[in-house]
Amino acid sequence: MPYCDHNATSPLRPACRDAIAHALAIGGNPSSVHANGRTARAVVEEARDWVAKLVRATPDQVIFTSGATESNTLALCGAVEGALDQNEARQASRITRLFVSAIEHSSVLRAAERLAERSAGIRLEIIPVTEGGVVDTEALRVMLREGKGRALVAVMAANNETGVVQPIAEISRLTREAGALLLVDAVTAAGKIDLDISLCDYLTLSAHKLAGPQGAGALIVGENAPLAAQLVGGGQQKGLRAGTENLSGIAGFGAAAKAVLADVSLEDGAERVRIAAIRDHFEAVVKREIPDTVIFGETSERLCSTSNVAVPGLSSDNIVISLDLDGVQVSTGSSCSSGKIAPSHVLSAMGVDEKLAGASLRVSFGWNSSQAEADCVVASLLRLNSRASARAA
Ligand code: PMP
């Protein structure tokens, strides 16, 4: 069955399955000093090396978590609390402003809202995006300049619904100049564009978006970035994230990072070129066959993997159900919010009107995608569109 929903979860690579099976068979706790414990520890540390390499970090900067939702919460809450701990006497280091882009994943938006609600003296402001789905750096510059107090800024490396790549280098420069901290959710971008922890203070990853297992993720912490643990207990991971490590999940995550690095290291970026060709083919055929198709973020820099299109006259829910009946698996908006009938907050932030946003579908490709799958999506979409046009006539 064609599966074009890699931004929701990218199917497990065989190498990850093998690594998971191997880890499950060890039967030891990575904190134990006996032989099985040491074998388990070696698996965790090898995975840490691969995950670190993916974002040009050193292994000691990697904290394994249960996924990017936990990583984002740990970064936001841990930064605010850690900035207090770091210098109780100096008010200047306290975080008093949270600047979060309008297109962040709900795990960043909701956590930031809750943090602002529950902490006296912290204000949340939303950074707008352009029609092309790019964070408005000029607006951020003004926000950083006006107002008082240290800011924590959250901007994702690339958006999960549109694939639009965000200007992280420029945002990094602006935040550094302002003495602010920067959280980058790199969940969708990882493996598709180069990532570098030195540009930010916190970077979050999720294994299942990289063709690893669900329930494993990481927070990468920049040098000197404040961080207070949010889960306490055993002293695992230098006390920053207590709890016995998810050995099999971490092993699968490491194998996923290793596989991605093998792709990336192809001199000519061949894997990205291959995936981009599938995506471009999909868009070219849909546009040719249904000329009024709208491609969101079309004029912006986008990841090779993602296409978010609207076919006026259709409805997202119908598209997804009808394609599913044809055995074609795609998504509407972000998969975490599908199931709820709410317009995509990403498309509304881009100024897309509700009706058009309600006609959108997201197609996302990955390591095992083929052009034949893209053709199946188009064929199914065309069948649905002609049925809808016939009914309307
Ligand atoms: N950030 C982004 C951009 C995501 O797409 C997701 C998952 N949909 C998350 C964070 C949360 O990741 P996880 O499923 O690992 O909790």
Image: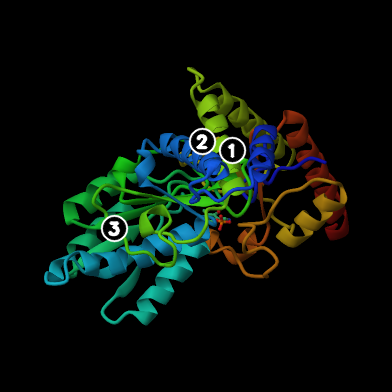
Q: Quadrant of residue 337?
A: bottom right
Residue type (three-letter) at the residue carrying disc 3: Leu
Q: Are marks 2 and 1 in contact (CB under 8 Å)?
A: yes
Asked whether 11 or 53 is in front, the reply is 53
Quadrant of res 338? bottom right
Residue 25 x/y as whole percent: 68, 42
Left or right: residue 390 versus residue 192 is: right
- Of badges 2 and 1, the one in the foreground is 2
Task: Assign a secondary structure to mark 2.
Answer: loop
236 is higher (above) or lower (below) than 233: above
* Quadrant of the frame with the C terminus: bottom right
* Residue at 61%, 30% in the rendered image: 275
Q: Is residue 301 above or below residue 108?
A: above
Please give left or right for residue 203 compared with residue 273 in the image: left
**Residue 294 visible to an observer of this rendering:** no
What type is the residue that disc 1 sits on? Ser
Image quadrant of ligand 1 equals bottom right
Amino acid found under the numbered disc labelled 2: Lys
Between 53 and 327, the residue placed more toward the observer is 53
